Amino acid sequence: MASSAPSHIFEDKFEVIQVDPDGKKFEKVSRIVCQGESYEMELVLDVHFGLFKCKIGEKINFALASTIDPSGRKEEENYDQRERKTLMDGYDYVMHGRVFEIEEDKKTTDSVIYASFGGLMMSLKGNSGNFTQLEPDMRVYAMCKKAQGMEMDD
């Protein structure tokens, strides 16, 4: 897992392969299913579709980080609202939440990470060696942006 910042736990480029595979459940939320390019991971992510629209075939850059501080410094319990440079500056859509379960497959080296971002869910499935720094009850930031040449529609 190549990481451009010390706080990044995982990052990869993903292709959106499905949008709302089980139908639309909420007016402003869509579930996107994505396939990773470098690590062959499967990402299922709920997003506020008014803020981050995705279409099948589009590519997104996705990262999980333990902090938004570019130096990797651990953050205080409360969000620091001072104007400053953060990792969020490089992304279109950022959510803060918690890892609530890590499910390991005893027969393979695969694991599934489950996290909740204020009720918006994420699962990330693949080789557990790609996210060894994640642990249950850990606070994380999920950060997304359209891949180069894939600009967001208004």
Image (tube, rainbow, N blue to C red):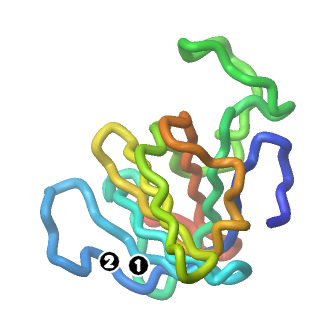
Q: Nearer the viewer, residue 154 or 61?
A: 61
The residue located at (41%, 44%) in the rendering is 100
Task: Tell me the residue that label 2 is attached to.
Answer: 19
The residue located at (22%, 54%) in the rendering is 28
Residue 43 drawn above or below residue 35: above
Amino acid on which disc 2 is placed: Val
Residue 76 drawn above or below residue 42: above
Quarter of the figure that contains the C terminus: bottom left
User: How dense is the environment of label 2, judged by Cα within 10 Å: few (below 14), some, or many (20 and up)?
Assistant: many
Q: Nearer the viewer, residue 129 or 19?
A: 129
Secondary structure state at the residue bearing disc 2: strand
Q: Are marks 2 and 1 in contact (CB under 8 Å)?
A: yes
State the mark number for residue 55. Answer: 1
The residue located at (57%, 68%) in the rendering is 151
> Could you tell me residue 85's position as x and y percent?
76, 28
Residue 79 drawn above or below residue 140: above
